[in-house]
Amino acid sequence: MMRQYELVDRVRKYNPQANEDLLNRAYVYAMKAHGSQKRASGDPYFSHPLEVAAILTSLRLDDATIVAAVLHDTIEDTASTREEIDQIFGEEIGRLVDGLTKLKKLDLVSKQAEQAENFRKMLLAVAVDVRVLLVKLADRLHNMRTLQYVPPEKRQRIAQETLDIYAPLAGRMGMQAIRDELENLSFRTLMPDAFKMIEERLTELRKANGKLIARIEKELSDALSARDIKTDVKGREKTPYSIWRKMERKSIGFEQLSDIFGFRVVVPTLEDCYRVIGVVHTKWPNVPGRFKDYISTPKQNDYRSIHTTVVGPGRQRVELQVRTRDMNEVADNGIAAHALYKDGRTVDVGQLSSESRAYEWLRRTVDALNQGDTPEDFLEHTKLELFHDQVFCFTPKGRLIALPRGATPIDFAYAVHTDVGNHAVGARINGHIAPLLSELQNGDEVQIVTAEGQVPPAAWESLVMTGKARAAIRRATRDAVREQYSGLGRQIVARAFERAGKTLSDDRLKAALPRLARQSVEEVLAAVGRGEMYSGDVVKAVYPEFVVERAKMPGQMKTADGWFGRDAASNVAFKVPGAGGEAAGAIPIRGLRGDLPVSFAPNGGAVPGDRIVGILTPGEGVTIYPIQSPALTQFDDQPERWLDVRWDVEAASGSLFPVRISVSVINEPGALGIVATVIGETGGNIDHVTITNRSDDVRELVLDIEVRDLKHLTAVISQLKAQKVVSRIERVNG
C-alpha cells in the first residue's frame, strides 16, 4: 500500500507547488474513515482509493482531483457526510466527491434502472466539472485490475458494464490508454477462451515478425533522417479486444488480419507530419483508400493524426500513424491532456468547453438529461452513441457535423437543431435530392428541406442512429398524440358545457384543477380525450351546482329526435372526398395511419362516404362506426360517449380504410383466386379471408378488405358481381 510520503512525492514530481498539507490531511482522513474495512481481496479498503490516486498522478492532475480520488468512497461507504467534507476540505473537493457518490436507497424496479440513474447522476456532475469523470474512470480501472477477487456473477456484470459504458466513454474522452486496458480486462473476464487464443497467436506472431518489425523501424527512421526530419518511430500492435472486434465485425479469421502491427511516427511540428507523408509515399506505394487526415479534421474526441498504409519492406503492408508529441499526448490521455501542468499550472476546467471537442460532446449528451426521457432511455441512447465510429458531414455554410457511422440525414437534421429535425421533409446530399434514410458518407454536404407543420413519424425512432434524434422524435410523437387527445377532449368538453347551458372558459377550468386532480388544463382535456375522465365531471367541477343527468337514449337507432336531439340524424357531420357539408363543428377523422386516438369498429369498418358516428372508449380514444351498424344499439344508454365526426380525407391521398364483405362463390377450382384477382385489379387490398360455410356447391367467404372510399367499394362489389363464380355479395355491418 502506498505510503503517505509516497503520494506527496508522486504529485511533487510534476507539481513542485503541490499543497502537501492538503494531501496529508486527505490521506489521514480517508485512512481513519475506512478504518478496518476490507476489500474482496482481503487488502485494507483504503488501498483502493490510494491506487486510484496513483493512476491519476500519472496523468499529472491537480491537487483537488488527487484529494477527491483519495476521498471518493468516504461519503458512500463510511460515516462521512458531504457537509463534513466541505468543512474540512472545501466545497470544490466536496462537490467532486459527491459527484462520485452513488445514489443510496434507490426504490427502482430493476438493476438496469439503478445503473441508469447512477450513471445519470455522475454525468450531471461531470457537466459541472470533468474531473469527476477522470476519477471515475481511474476508479473503474483499478476495480477491473482486481476483478478476480469478486464473485463470478458480479464479476460478469461489472465487466459487461465496463465494456458497455466506461470503456467507450473513455474512448469518447480520447483517453485511449485507459480505454484499451478497460476493454482488454473486460474481454478477458467475459470471453476468457477467446482472449487466451488471441494472446497465444500474438505471442507466436511477435516471435515470427520480430526481425521484420525492427527492419521496418530502421528503414523508416533512416529514410526520414536523410530528409532532416527528427522522429521517434515505434512499432505497436493491436490490443486483443480490438483484434477480436474486427474479426467479429468482418467475419474473418486471425490469419486474414493485415494490420495487427503498425508504426507510430512522432515528430516535433505540424509541418513535419506532412513532410513524413511526402517521404513515405515517395519511397513506398500507398494502399488506395487507406489515407485519413485527422489533423485537418479531428475526431470528436480531439484525436489528431495522419493515418496511411503503404506496401513497405518485404512487400508487407505497413500501417503508419503520424503525429506531433502534443497530439500523441492527447491521443493517449485525451481530455486529461488539457489539464496537464504547463509552466507550473493546470488549465482551468472551465476552459475545456473551448479547448476540447470531447467535452463539447459530453455537454451535449448531458443536455439530453433535461429533455424528459427516463434514465433507462438516456442510458440506451448514450450507449448507442458511444459505440459508433464517426462520419464528418458539412452544412451548406461549411459547418462541420460529426455523426455516428451509419447516420442518416434525419440524424444530421437533429444535430443541426431539434426544430430542423422535427420539420424535415427531404434532403439534398452534395446537391442531389436523396431519401431521408440515405446513409451519410465522410465529406457529404447535406442540406435539409423543411416544412412548417410537419411532425416526425414515430417510425423514425427505430431508424436513426443518434440518441439526440431518438429522444427528440419520441418527444415530438408523444407531444403530437397528447395534442390530438387534448384537441379531441376540448371539443368533447365544449359540447358538454353547451348541453349544460354553460360556457367553457380556460380560466374557470384552471380554477377547478384541484377538484379534478390535474396539473393543467391540457391534462384535463387530454384525459377527457382518452376517455379517462367523463366530460360531465368537468362541468360539475367548474359549476358545482350543476346536476349531471345521463338521459337514456331511445331504444331504436332512428327516431324523430335522431342522434344528439337532431332530426333523423340529418346533421350527423361527414365529408366525402371533394364534397362540402355542414361539418364545421365535427371532429375530423383521417384514418389509422398516423398517431391519432382513432380506430375503426371491428366486424365491418367504415370508409369515406359512409355516414359515421364516433363512440368515445376509455383508454382507446374514438371508435368509428357507420350509422347503419347494429353494434351502436349497445351505446343507446350512454349519450355522453357519442360524438359528431366527419371525414377529412383528400381524394388523392391514397389512404385505405377497412370494410368487410361477404361473398358466396360456386365451389370450383380457382374461385378464390378469381375473387382475389378482381379485388387486386380494382385497387383494393385483402387483409383477411375466412371461409364460413363449406358445402358441395357453394363456399361462403368473409373478406376484410381495404378501399379508398365508398365509390371505390361500390366499384369492387360491382366487378365481383360480374364474375360467373360469384352468386351473391353484400357488405357486412358489424
Image (tube, rainbow, N blue to C red):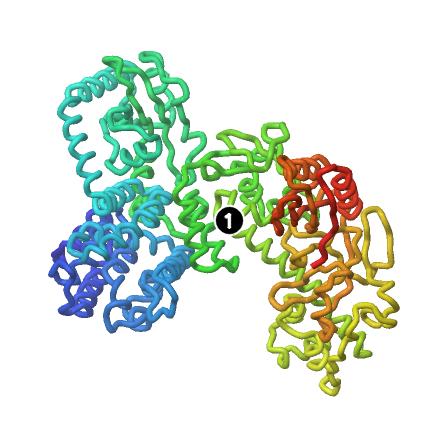
Mark 1: which amino acid? Answer: Lys
Residue 506 quadrant: bottom right
| Quadrant into which the C terminus falls | bottom right
Q: Is residue 576 left or right of residue 483?
A: right
**Height in image: 516 above or below 718?**
below
**Height in image: 492 above or below 330?**
below
How crowded is the residue under tag 1: few (<14 C-alpha within 10 Å), some, or many (20+)?
many
**Height in image: 697 above or below 544?**
above
Q: Residue shown at 63%/35% (left/top)?
A: 670
Can the viewer see residue 11 in this picture? no
For label 1, the residue is 468
Residue 377 pos. (x, y %): 45, 55
Residue lying at the far bottom of the rendered structure: 545
Residue lying at the far front of the rendered structure: 696
Q: Is residue 220 left or right of residue 486?
A: left
Q: Residue shown at 73%/64% (left/top)?
A: 630
Residue 603 pos. (x, y %): 66, 57
Q: Is residue 446 left or right of residue 231?
A: right
Q: Secondary structure at mark 1?
A: helix
